Amino acid sequence: MKEAFLKIGSILMALIVLLSTMSFTVDMHYCGDNLVDFSLYDKVDTCMMKAEITKTSNSCEVMEMEMDCCTDIEVVVEGQDDLKISFDQLTFDQQLFIASFVHSYINLFEGLEENSIPYRDYSPPPLIRDVQILDQTFLI
């Protein structure tokens, strides 16, 4: 159960980092109150009414009316750019602390080349009498 929570937590943290650094743009084109075109990452297409009006430039009144009723809305969501801190921007004391911490942390997990038994060459003392049984004191 603990492993499942750890996996779920790590996936959630990865998604939070991904979504906080991602930026995107949403473009919407309205004609009047109606949504005509919707686009992510691209520019929206303009109304077909505008294209037809520009071809037939006879009616200036219709062209002005159509230009006023069509609107483009652009929503921009920018992500973070300052997640990576450069080692050069730190002060000398901070660099010294990080270098010493990393060095001591790496050396913390160095193992011995072989298992050493410090009392291998010494024999235990001879058992003359068993004091615990004589005094009947037992560890429970």
Image (cartoon, helix red, strand yellow):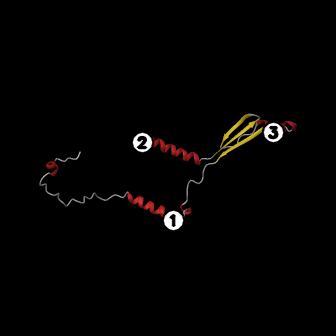
> Is 20 positioned to the left or the right of 124 in the image?
right
Q: Which mark is residue 68?
A: 3
Q: Calculate the distance from the C-alpha at mark 1 to the C-alpha at mark 2.
A: 38 Å
Q: Residue at x 84, y 39 (%)?
A: 64
Closer to the eye: label 1 or 2: 1
Q: CA distance from mark 1 to mark 3?
A: 62 Å
Q: Residue at label 1?
A: 93
User: Circle 2 is placed at which residue position?
Assistant: 3
Earlier-in-chain disc, 1 versus 2: 2
Disc nearer the start of the sequence (1/3): 3
Residue type for callout 2: Glu
Residue visible at 34% across and 58% down in the picture: 111
Between disc 1 and disc 3, the foreground one is: 1
Q: Position of residue 26 (x, y in %)?
A: 67, 42
Residue type beneath disc 3: Asp
Rendered residue at 75%/39% (across/down): 46
Asked which secondary structure carries label 1, the reply is helix
